[in-house]
Image (spheres, grey):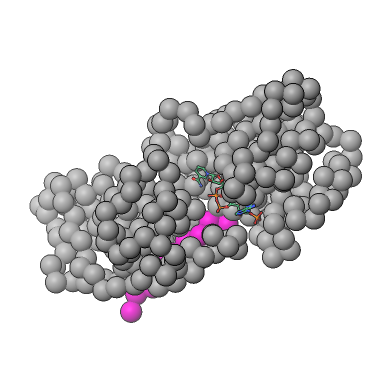
Amino acid sequence: MSVTVEKERTMRAIVQREFGSSAVLRVEEAAVPEPGEGEVLVRVAAAGVHAVDTDIRRGDGPPSMPKPALPMTPGREVAGTVEAVGPDVDTALLGTRVVAHVGFRSGGYAESAIAPAAALHTVPAGMPFAQAVAAIGTGRTAQLVLESVEFRPDDVVIIPGASGGLGSQLVQLALSEGATVVALYGGEAKRAVVEQLAHGGRRTAGRLHALDATDDTWPEQMAELLDGAQPSVLIDGVGGATGRAAVESLGRGARVVIIGWSSGEIVRLDSTDIVARSLTVAVPLGRALPDLRELETRALAAVAEGRTAPPVDEYRLEDAAAAHDAIEQRRQRGKVVLVPTRT
Ligand SMILES: NC(=O)c1ccc[n+]([C@@H]2O[C@H](COP(=O)([O-])OP(=O)(O)OC[C@H]3O[C@@H](n4cnc5c(N)ncnc54)[C@H](OP(=O)(O)O)[C@@H]3O)[C@@H](O)[C@H]2O)c1
């Protein structure tokens, strides 16, 4: 049996008609899409906003992502309740709590969005939709990084960008493995969200030191706090001066995991650094495409088991432009999420 939505139904959606600044993200009244074969319609409770969404919006996405045809509704991560199913999809899904990464098809910044039934994961009762959506994209990346790092309980881990979507989950995962974590953030306004990471996951076992990387003395402050211990792991998604200072603080045999360069400059590291301190360097996100569904399952399990409790920075659907501004102006606190409220 097929269950479809009435054709004339409309919803609010962010519609992007041109590439450009965040001002191109405008809320419009749009037709509710109908799920086709193998698809469901999700009533969106939370839609993930990703730093890459801001690049795509400018028409400046990475080469691995095709430039979208316009007009389009952005948003590749959605969580909510199944409200309609395609002709060949099991009606038992109706009313269930789900989360999905919908990939390049996008459409998440809306009150309702299409998702392939095969992409759905069940969201357990009690797990907030916003945390499920933080797990489905950013969390799966964190799981991939985790594979490369192989945390040990005696590790001392430096994580720049700890206030961001990925950094915050990596801090919690490292803490849950018993590591000592030096979490770096950019300015006083970010301190509270980073300090709370020590209390977010129910299974926290490691020790957290939160330091402001805009204070150039952070390496000395770190050395004092570590009382002679030297960092054994750097997970760097920021690069620039912060990444470089972190490299210089590493102990012999340390592992460096490069995951990005939010500062605009990839961390400077040459063979002299590697040889002088016997560093091992990994770039996990450059490898062949892994089994993403397995990583998504693990990321959701990490939330369910209390190893992560991703902090979320919530915006209303109509404030999508402000959500993008927060990412581009470095004001995000955790994973940025749009939460449509219905009228
Ligand atoms: N999320 C994913 O799935 C994913 C996938 C592949 C790669 N990555 C890479 O991983 C890194 C982190 O991703 P994310 O999703 O956590 O991004 P995000 O939420 O935008 O966080 C980035 C963090 O970088 C820090 N940062 C330091 N200097 C910055 C600067 N000059 N401009 C902007 N941010 C700056 C900011 O923290 P402070 O202001 O507190 O320093 C910010 O919280 C990025 O390099 C991204 O490209 C992420």
Q: Position of residue 27 (x, y in %)?
A: 34, 72
Magenta stretch containing residue 199, yes or no?
no
Residue range of the region highlighted in magenta in the rendering: 334-343
Quarter-of-image position of residue 129: bottom left
Residue occupying the point 85% across, 34% down: 229
- In percent of width and height, residue 23 lies at 42, 70
What residue appears at the point 22 percent right and 72 percent down from the top-left corner?
A: 10
Work out whether 111 lies above or below 39.
below
Residue 185: image quadrant is bottom right
Of residues 328 and 100, the one drawn nearer to the viewer in this rendering: 328
Name the quadrant of the C terminus: bottom left
Query: On the image, which quarter does residue 57 sit in?
Result: bottom left
- Furthest toward the left, the residue is 1
Give the residue displayed 42% in from the left and 57% down from the top: 58
Q: Position of residue 97 (x, y in %)?
A: 35, 55
Task: Give how far across and how far down residue 192 sits, in percent.
Answer: 70, 62
Q: Is residue 317 above or below residue 64?
A: below
Res 26 seen here: yes
Residue 337 forms part of the magenta stretch: yes
Residue at the bottom extreme of this rendering: 343
**Looking at the image, is 83 positioned above or below residue 148?**
below
